[in-house]
Amino acid sequence: MVRGRQQRRADTPARILDVAERLAQRQGYNSFSYADVATELQITTASLHYHFTGKAELGRAMIRRYTERFLEALADIEARVSAASARLAAYADLYAGVLREQRLCLCGMLAAEYQTLPEGMREAVLGFFDANEAWLSRILEDGRAAGQLRFTGSPQDAARMIVAGLEGAMLLARPYGDATRFQSAAQQLLQGLSAGPATE
Amino acid sequence: MVRGRQQRRADTPARILDVAERLAQRQGYNSFSYADVATELQITTASLHYHFTGKAELGRAMIRRYTERFLEALADIEARVSAASARLAAYADLYAGVLREQRLCLCGMLAAEYQTLPEGMREAVLGFFDANEAWLSRILEDGRAAGQLRFTGSPQDAARMIVAGLEGAMLLARPYGDATRFQSAAQQLLQGLSAGPATE
DNA sequence: GTCTATAGGCAGATAGAC
DNA sequence: GTCTATCTGCCTATAGAC
């Protein structure tokens, strides 16, 4: 891939997004500044404005990339794992991986800040959750049809409960610095869905 | 109750806390300012500093009052409602009432902002969750002992799952402006705990 | 208790040189 | 692409009059 000489290392926009994403997941979108990002990358805030016209645009790009990557991870789970309950466990593990880095789900954090977000970011946040729900709904529906999962109500409702439960479990586990809080909650949340013979 | 002449209406500190609490629940602690509170009360930020030396102290007082009131509501549930599953439903209704005002649980919001909070506020946030867990654990344990509830694992783990699930459900329901998202998640979360004859 | 006035810092953003 | 310099605005906080 011939690229010219101007950038040996990773694209500057990508590195900006890396830093912004981490800061947003740890502190919140409203609690990091252009200066924070610029300092860490050893450039100036004026340079940031060259790559992203404003913080709102940076925010939008951040969510879009995060969602893309998350959906890739979901496709990967579907390709690698076939058992429905194992797929759900792998889904929960995605969250656990984020928490391990002392981060919240980016969109969970942004959901808390939702009322202060610019319109473009709001839509992107909802898009993330919609996509997660759609994927989970499909996995749940297929799993139930295959006799691997058992739940009452619609797959969509179950999917929403799972997303809410995992987001909440992350939210609470982090202040305690206790990953087992998340694991325990995730396990309880999902165990009720397995159609194993030992449920009753 | 003789009070002198200087304050006919509600205590100024209480009114300050009312406004700060609502703003914190809607926008987050980091996203409201002394000026926001002062403007709404038609006083100046200098006056605010007379009642609360700084924003951190205001924040601490806010959490303490919120926790006190929440615990009173829990005691009230325990006094009014005797069936364990009805107590859990009433607990979830507390959250629903908050959401109805387009607010998040104060401490759920602060959990998201946790890493940016001053030390005094952090402790107070954990205290809120600890107290909730302790109350729920007791309710769950009693309910199981009375044969009204059924769950595997410790009451504490179940309590943590409930708190996490309800906090997450609030977090996600609000951006969608859809209270039924909360209700549906809360119902699914709790229904698995009832020891009713129709579970299987 | 509440005010005016103001300090001192940080925010996001832009103009224009290199 | 990145810089320096700068603007405007908001933030928390304080001094001191009333």
Image (tube, coloured by chain):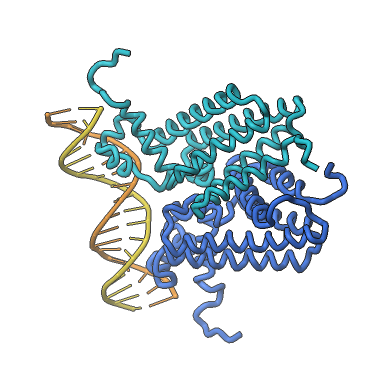
Chain colours: A cyan, B blue, C orange, D yellow
In front of the other: A199 or D16: A199
| Residue projecting furthest to the top | A2
Residue B42, can we see it?
A: no
Residue B10, x across and y down, in percent: 56, 72
Residue B53, x across and y down, in percent: 40, 69
In front of the other: B97 or A167: A167
Residue that appears at 25% across and 38% down: A42
Residue that appears at 58% across and 65% down: B67
Residue D8, x across and y down, in percent: 29, 47
Q: Quadrant of the C terminus of chain B?
A: top right
Residue that appears at 58% across and 23% down: A80
Number of callouts:
0
| Residue projecting furthest to the right | B197
Residue A13 in which image quadrant: top left
Above or below, B52 relative to B104: below
Residue that appears at 78% across and 36% down: A197
